[in-house]
């Protein structure tokens, strides 16, 4: 099945961030997300889910266990289960990325 933002379920999260569920199952979640400038999500971890973030547009900052990593377009970042993390957009441009979670992470999120 061909999937894109226009034929996928949309949701809002954080402060004016958007997401589209491209694949949504218990075993796998693939979401395309847009984060406006100067936004971040809350620090959290997942007990079971691993995640892979692939940056489509912009530059993302990832805080992982207190360390900051800058990730640019056409580059990905792997987060392992139990790693305390969050994604930030510290730029003045929109950030667009794909986040893949295996298994799905929504019921496996522990906020700090």
Image (cartoon, rainbow, N blue to C red):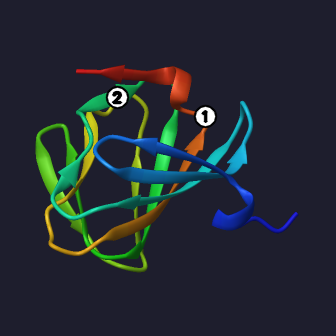
**Residue that numbered label 1 is attached to:** 104
Residue 16's label in the rendered image is none
**Residue that numbered label 2 is attached to:** 45
Residue 95 placement: quadrant: bottom left
The structure residue drawn at horizontal position 75% and vertical position 61%, both measured from the top left corner, is: 7
- Tell me: 12 left or right of 63: right
The structure residue drawn at horizontal position 64% and vertical position 64%, both measured from the top left corner, is: 5
Q: Position of residue 20 (x, y in %)?
A: 59, 53
- Tell me: 93 left or right of 99: left
Dot 2 falls on a residue whose secondary structure is: strand
Comparing 99 with 66, the one in front is: 99
Q: Position of residue 69 (x, y in %)?
A: 19, 59
Q: Position of residue 107 (x, y in %)?
A: 54, 21
Dot 1 falls on a residue whose secondary structure is: loop
Please identify the quadrant where the C terminus is shown: top left
Please identify the quadrant where the N terminus is shown: bottom right
Placement of 109 over or under 50, stated as above or below: above
The structure residue drawn at horizontal position 15% and vertical position 73%, both measured from the top left corner, is: 92
Residue 86 placement: quadrant: top left
């Amino acid at each position: 099945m061909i999937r894109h933002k226009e034929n996928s379920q949309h949701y809002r999260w954080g402060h004016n961030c958007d997401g589209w569920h491209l694949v949504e199952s218990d075993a796998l979640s693939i979401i395309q997300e847009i984060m406006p400038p100067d936004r971040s999500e809350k620090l959290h971890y997942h007990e079971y889910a691993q995640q892979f973030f692939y940056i489509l547009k912009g530059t993302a900052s990832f805080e992982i266990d207190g360390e900051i990593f800058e990730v640019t377009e056409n580059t990905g970042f792997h987060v392992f289960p139990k790693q305390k993390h969050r994604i930030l957009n510290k730029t003045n441009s929109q950030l667009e990325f794909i986040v893949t979670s295996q298994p799905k992470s929504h019921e496996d999120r522990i906020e700090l």
